[in-house]
Amino acid sequence: MRLIGLIAAAASAIAALASPAAAQKEFGSDELIAAAKKEGRLVYYTANFAEVEQEVIKAFNKRFPEIRVEMVRAPGGQLITRIKTEAATEKLSADVINHSDRGLMLALDDLFQDYAPPNAADYREDAKVSPKLWPGVTLGWCIAYNSALIKTPPKTWADLLNPEYGNRQMGQVAGPSGGTTWTRAMFERQVLGEDYWAKQAKLDVIYYPSGAPMADAMVRGEIIVGPLLYNIAYTKARDGAPIETVFPPEGVPIVPYADGIPKTAKNPNAAKLFMNWRLSVEGQTFMIKDLGNITSLKTPPVYPKGWDPATKKVWLPKYDEFEKLRESWLADWNKVYNYRQ
């Protein structure tokens, strides 16, 4: 009996040591949640599509209806300019900022406060460029095709060099269009081979400024195949369009966003709760299943349609190379594809 008592006492001691962590729930402590509800609102700056972020906000409000999220949406470059201007005049009104270009956000690192979600240890270290900035959104590239026009679809990135997709039947978003396309172009050159661009350029590819018009052209049958961000293809297919997707075995280039909470946030508790929910298993599951995102969690809670975790892998560029190589490699891309902006 004495042994049993000692074991019980030891167990109690261990539980006591673990109690601070245990008190930290999936979305934050009870105190944080109560303080966030008291604030009752937050201002959310995003460079993502407004329609997508509205769905995220609705899902967040199903969990926390007491907090009103006021969204301010602007294209990437314009949003950064607005943040810099407001910060310079001490009028930055954002409580949370979400942006697709990690480099631009890293340049503003001093504007952000120290922050980490409850499940910080579950995230890939290489998906972050700063301890203050977190990948609440992670997009990934796939091969998309018009299923009404292609019955035997490509299965690998190498298949996109097949002459049967030539003569302006293939589309792609131009390499210099932004950080997401630069990620794809970098993957092609580093993983698929130095000559991949040159071989594909011979097929007379049609170029688009972004994924949305390319997806629309694919639905209309103006092109039949091409690399596309999965979330764009997914939402088209979800709404009934004849688009199917393939995650090639050579790798899936992923694009982690950078989200942070400014030091000047007027609703810091609501901001932390919103970030915590987005980065939680619940938030990431919603964005994978409903929006076609990937995730920067080390262990995904769910997988996209057609994703076999035994054979599919993600590819993330080394950040120093991502920044160092961008200008010269994109100049090469323009030359190889004979592309002029």
Image: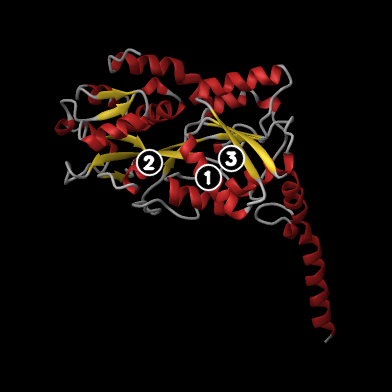
Comparing 201 with 178, the one in front is: 178
Please state which amino acid type lies under the numbered disc 1: Val
Residue 230 is labelled as: 2
For label 2, the crowd category at 10 Å Cα-Cα, with few meaning under 14, some 14 to 19 and many 20 or more, is many
Q: Nearer the viewer, mark 1 or mark 3?
A: 1
Lower sequence index among marks 1 and 2: 1
**Vertical order, 60 against 17 (above or below):** above
Label 1 close to label 3 by CB (< 8 Å) = no
Q: Label 3: which residue?
A: 125
For label 3, the crowd category at 10 Å Cα-Cα, with few meaning under 14, some 14 to 19 and many 20 or more, is some
Residue 18: quadrant of the picture: bottom right
For the residues labelled 1 and 3, the Cα–Cα distance comes to 24 Å
Lower sequence index among marks 2 and 3: 3
The residue located at (66%, 26%) in the rendering is: 109
Q: Label 1: which residue?
A: 56
Q: Nearer the viewer, mark 2 or mark 3?
A: 2
Residue 4: quadrant of the picture: bottom right
Residue 184 in view (yes/no): yes
Q: Position of residue 225 (x, y in %)?
A: 24, 36
Q: Position of residue 39 (x, y in %)?
A: 74, 43
Please state which amino acid type lies under the numbered disc 2: Tyr
Secondary structure of the residue carrying numbered label 3: helix
The quarter of the image holding the C terminus is top left
Secondary structure of the residue carrying numbered label 2: helix
Please state which amino acid type lies under the numbered disc 3: Glu
Q: Nearer the viewer, mark 1 or mark 2?
A: 1
For the residues labelled 2 and 3, the Cα–Cα distance comes to 23 Å
For label 1, the crowd category at 10 Å Cα-Cα, with few meaning under 14, some 14 to 19 and many 20 or more, is some
For the residues labelled 1 and 2, the Cα–Cα distance comes to 17 Å
The residue located at (58%, 49%) in the rendering is: 60
